[in-house]
Image: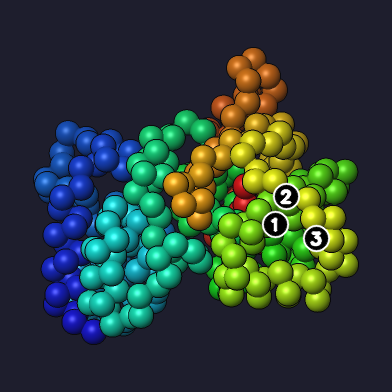
């Protein structure tokens, strides 16, 4: 691992970003040309001390997950992301899928501008890549897991706790939608080993999945009406919209509610309370474990 070059590269990328580019206020006392270290740390979900040590050329080798978070926070293009991984002596992650996938710039640019509504970018297998603060407040942070468990579709059929996001009476609808969408992904990707392994694992673990998979229903989900169970605000009725990347492997999704509705009022309140831990069931990070989906 090249500590000094990694430190210099991180600093150079930080200096070129304007606060407005990532939705941060400029402020009257800004003394640096780009972002502050603590701002990069916040955007990447890291501690300020940890990121500072990286920029000073110290500390342990960062994980692939940390590098992926830094690449998103610093708005690196594909070549820059690969360079960052090489400097840290980490294998390059898959280009288009998995929780360490590089978020497509067009989707990330749109996400940066969605500051008043919950929004996030996910893969076609429903792995959360990046989310704005309102999305974290609405549906929770993604769990720190790898492999198939990173997919909310996989957790939906294998972890009953993941279903707490939706009212019980809505579960059959979501099961049908998830399976039909996965059928479309499997057809588009062809004999993709990642999808093949996930489908095989789900067939072994869930009779419900097998029953729905055998119906052969196929439908890419582009929009849906949802009721989301929030620990402080109760059930929130929202519309969920999806914008697919050109290759279909990533999706920007956001939640809205018509003006004047109870859902709109709840979203307004959500922006006030943010990610405060208002329930005894939240974990130490202020999230509802096992949730974070679309």
> Which residue is nearer to you in this view: 32 or 4?
4
> Image point 70% across, 64% down: which residue?
155
In the rendered structure, find residue 218 and report the number of the disc placed on it.
Answer: 2
Mark 1, other Cα within 10 Å: few <14 / some 14–19 / many ≥20? some
Q: Position of residue 87 (x, y in %)?
A: 22, 77
Q: Label 3: which residue?
A: 213
> Image point 40% across, 55% down: which residue?
103
Q: Do the residues labelled 3 and 1 touch (CB within 8 Å)?
A: yes
Under circle 1, the secondary element is helix
Mark 3, other Cα within 10 Å: few <14 / some 14–19 / many ≥20? some
In the rendered structure, find residue 183 and report the number of the disc placed on it.
Answer: 1
> Which residue is nearer to you in this view: 143 or 101?
101
Q: Do the residues labelled 2 and 1 touch (CB within 8 Å)?
A: yes
Cα distance between the residues tagged 2 and 3? 9 Å
> Which residue is nearer to you in this view: 284 or 288?
288
User: Can residue 131 be seen at all in this image of the molecule?
Assistant: no
Residue 190, quarter of the rendered image = bottom right
Q: Position of residue 242 (x, y in %)?
A: 56, 40
Cα distance between the residues tagged 3 and 1? 8 Å
Marked residue nearer the N-terminal end (3 or 1): 1
Q: In this view, does 45 lie to the left or right of 293?
A: left
């Amino acid at each position: 691992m090249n500590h000094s070059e990694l430190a210099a590269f991180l600093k150079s990328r930080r200096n070129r970003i304007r606060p407005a580019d990532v939705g941060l206020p400029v402020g009257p006392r800004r003394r640096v040309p780009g972002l502050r270290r603590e701002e990069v740390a916040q955007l990447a979900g890291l501690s300020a001390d940890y990121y500072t040590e990286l920029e000073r050329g110290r500390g342990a080798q960062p994980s692939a997950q940390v590098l992926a978070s830094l690449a998103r926070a610093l708005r690196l293009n594909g070549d820059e992301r690969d360079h960052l991984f090489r400097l840290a002596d980490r294998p390059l992650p898959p280009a288009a899928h998995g929780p360490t996938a590089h978020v497509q710039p067009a989707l990330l640019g749109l996400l940066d501008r969605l500051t008043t509504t919950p929004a996030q970018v996910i893969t076609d297998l429903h792995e959360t890549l990046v989310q704005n603060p309102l999305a974290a407040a609405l549906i929770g942070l993604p769990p720190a897991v790898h492999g198939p468990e990173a997919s909310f579709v996989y957790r939906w059929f294998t972890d009953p706790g993941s279903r707490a996001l939706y009212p019980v009476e809505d579960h059959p609808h979501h099961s049908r939608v998830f399976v039909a969408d996965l059928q479309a992904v499997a057809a588009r990707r062809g004999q993709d080993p990642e999808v093949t392994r996930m489908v095989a694992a789900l067939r072994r673990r869930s009779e419900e999945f097998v029953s729905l998979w055998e119906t052969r229903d196929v439908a890419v989900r582009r929009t849906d009406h949802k009721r989301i169970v929030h620990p402080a605000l109760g059930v929130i009725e929202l519309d969920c919209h999806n914008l697919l990347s050109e290759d279909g492997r990533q999706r920007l999704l956001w939640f809205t509610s018509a003006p004047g509705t109870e859902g709109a009022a709840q979203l307004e309140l959500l922006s006030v309370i943010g990610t405060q831990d208002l329930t005894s069931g939240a974990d130490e990070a202020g999230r509802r474990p096992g949730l974070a989906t679309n």
